Image (cartoon, helix red, strand yellow):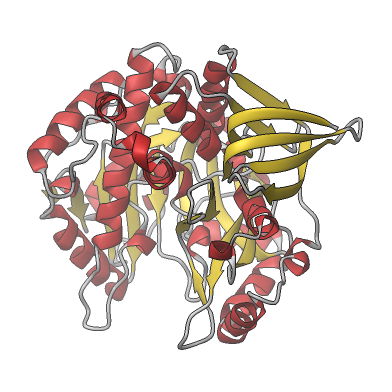
Amino acid sequence: MSLKKVDVLLVGAGVMSATLGKLLAQLDPSLKIMMVERLSKVAHESSHGLNNAGTGHAGYCELNYTPQLADGSVDISRALAINAAYEVSLQFWSYLVENGVLPAPEKFINPIFHQSFVWGEQNVAFLRKRYEALRSHHLFEEMEYSEDHAVLRQWMPLVMEHRDPGQAVAATQVKQGTDVDFGVLTRRLVKAMAVHPTFDLELGHTITGLKQYPDGRWHVRIKDNHTGHNKTIDAGFVFLGAGGGALPLLQKSGIPEGRGYGGFPVSGQWLICKNPDVVKRHSSKVYGKAATGAPPMSVPHLDARFIDGQPALLFGPFASITTRFLKQGSVLDLFASLKSGNLKPMLAVARDNLELTRYLVTEAFRSHKDRVASLQEFYADAKVKDWELASAGLRVQIIKGCDIDGGRLEFGTEIVTAKDGTLAALLGASPGASTSVQAMIEVIERCFKSRVKSADWQRKLKLMIPSYGESLDENDVLLHAVREKTLAVLGLERRKGKTGKVAK
């Protein structure tokens, strides 16, 4: 059995692994980095265009990031954190564009209005409170708000078409939103690394074992899916960035920090418009409120997208129950993940989330006509013949043990690292790809502690990400400076909105 020695082993050819690999390659070009992917293509699971929400999640329009509390107030803390994290991604991408590492920005990122839209007095009151809470912060000072039908017909003509003029409606809008094709971005990052002799890409290979040796290094067995040939990789650091496949690999590693984690898989489907006359009439992302009991990934939105350079119009996603951890995984994934350490939390979550399970089962059996009826709440004139169903991505939500309830279901992302810093895994889903740069910097800070404190790495991090080490949600002068730069470099400034505009 052959043995290859590397400094860094990246498991999974998605945006997280690609981002971490490129960051490390910039910090130390001499690092020997290998990326292993079980599929035959890069970015073909969660990072693929149709499998990813593609919003450029910034908290502008996603209402689930700003929950209403028991006292009626709106908690904006998560939206602030996500927005600041997305600004970090924009800075890194801008740096790579300026240095010719990434292609012309319109290949992977485009400006698009981010809008939230609600109807009904109670929802209007919520959106008004949300707007008032957000617009006072410099991260969201570009946000506009209106309850005026005439104004909203200008903002989102397709959504307002044939709508009852007496219906209570409200919307917010941010003009500096983005649409990101994370599939294209990921492939370009990997392509940029592949030109260096210190990088290896192994497609069509499956991880069959991980074992840490006394010297702290990991021996990782991989199998060629085509030939069945096995080989072992001797790695100083391992990153498990395999989307839903990260949890089984974390369990396989045996590190104590991974004990107790479980996963709750949720699949989804899109309605995709195939009528070009309709597609060209809608040019924004319009997010609504999720149904009661629905998971965050199923927040309904009428979404103008660019997928592989082509304009598209999507609605959904419609969540459904599954036992797979990957879109191209096995129906046995969920059952294989049950271990003695996570059985109690998994059972507790199953007990406490019966309504969610019932909701997912119900969604799975909805007819095409029923799904189009949901679309018609956003776009009243939608025709069944203009829309077809397509599979969206699959997400594995985190299940963690807790003393009070035995276990809890979390709708976010979490980085799990070994105590000695030799292994890290990214679990969870939203906001995921949009905050990949911030997340991977956290991996570097945890797992390369001594090196990241060096003057050389600090200088390079500051060069790639000018706000590194400072808080964008606390420093408005810094935010305005980096935002002006990234909007210009990425070609997004042409749609910049007016500060704090309220349409009466």
Point 31% across, 28% down: residue: 457
- Looking at the picture, tell me which residue is in the foreground, 398 or 217: 217
* Residue reaching furthest to the front: 214
Q: Is residue 273 left or right of residue 230?
A: left
- Looking at the picture, tell me which residue is in the foreground, 372 or 271: 271
Q: Is residue 125 left or right of residue 298?
A: left
> Can residue 60 be seen at all in this image of the molecule?
no
When asked about the image quadrant of residue 35, the answer is top right
The quarter of the rendered structure image containing the C terminus is bottom left
Point 62% across, 34% down: residue: 43
Q: Is residue 398 above or below residue 236?
A: below
Q: Residue 408 at what x, y percent from top left? A: 51, 77
Q: Is residue 179 above or below residue 82?
A: above
Q: Is residue 51 above or below residue 459?
A: below
Point 42% across, 20% down: residue: 106
Count up the numbered dots.
0
Q: Residue 149 at what x, y percent from top left? A: 26, 54
The quarter of the rendered structure image containing the N terminus is top right
* Residue reaching furthest to the left: 477
Q: Is residue 300 left or right of residue 42?
A: left
Q: Residue 427 at what x, y percent from top left? A: 54, 56
Q: Residue 229 at what x, y percent from top left? A: 89, 32
> Can residue 218 be seen at all in this image of the molecule?
yes
Q: Is residue 254 left or right of residue 168?
A: right
